[in-house]
Amino acid sequence: NCQLSILNAEPHSAKYYRCCERTMFQTSAQKPPPIFTFLTIALCVAVHIIIFVFTVNDLTLAFNARLVLFDFQLYRLLTSVYVHGGLLHIFFNMSSTFYIQSSLERQHGTLPMAYLIGCLIVLIGALQLILASVLWSVGFPSSMYENAVGYSGVLFSLLHLHSAQASSRSIYGFVEVPGWVYPWALLVLISVVMPNISWQGH
């Protein structure tokens, strides 16, 4: 019984957070997502369908540092978050959104979650611009032309906030790493499975 395991486990231990996480996932799977998480998933799916049906070039909506900085296409900071590069991309992101964002929204409320996501979108966009500019200035001009799409950056941020509470986390049951390392280790693992992901976007 996971609830008994939580009571018996040492607070902030790996066992404690594994049990909490399992309970969180079970709760999320048994209930529909809260309203803001539902709207997030619905928007991403709707955008993906529209792009597919009307054969929209998703690069016109993707984040591109050069086009944002020099052509002032600021809308890309927002549109790029809700565009995905394929069925696998949107499936993994929306599955993670369903579990992670649902849990956090239930804990903290819909309005605080909406405010947090809005702040994260702005912050992630700003950090992408800064990183691309720094890389360009030290001899990596391609960073200014890289296109990035997806909700992954927001999810990575939420996962980092959640994982930072744990002293350690298990990567699919194979190896345990410090809580603050977990999102980065997971990103490295995902980059092996999906080598075309954008490091800047995460």
Image (spheres, rainbow, N blue to C red):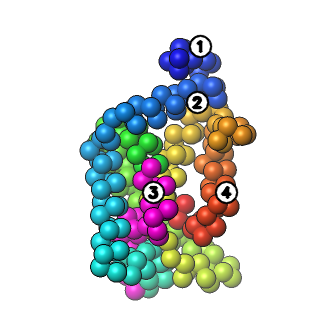
Separation of residues labelled 4 and 1 (CA atoms): 33 Å
Separation of residues labelled 3 and 1 (CA atoms): 36 Å
- SS class, disc 2: helix
Residue on which disc 3 sits: 91
Residue on which disc 4 sits: 188
Separation of residues labelled 4 and 2 (CA atoms): 21 Å
Residue type of the residue flagged with mark 3: Phe
| Comes first in the chain, label 3 or label 1 | 1
Disc 4 + disc 1, Cβ < 8 Å? no
Q: Nearer the viewer, residue 155 or 57?
A: 57
Residue on which disc 1 sits: 8
Identify the residue at horizontal 58%, vertical 66% (top origin). Answer: 197
Q: Which residues are magenta?
A: 71-95
Q: Is residue 125 visible?
A: no
Q: Position of residue 73 (x, y in %)?
A: 37, 80
**Direction from residue 112 to residue 131 in the image, left or right:** right
| Comes first in the chain, label 1 or label 2 | 1
**Crowd rating for badge 2 (residues with CA inside 10 Å; few <14, some 14–19, many 20+):** many
**Crowd rating for badge 3 (residues with CA inside 10 Å; few <14, some 14–19, many 20+):** few
- Residue 18 is labelled as 2
- SS class, disc 1: helix
**Direction from residue 45 to residue 66 in the image, left or right:** right
Task: Please tell me whether residue 35 is drawn above or below residue 78 in the rendered image.
Answer: above
Identify the residue at horizontal 47%, vertical 48% (top origin). Answer: 96
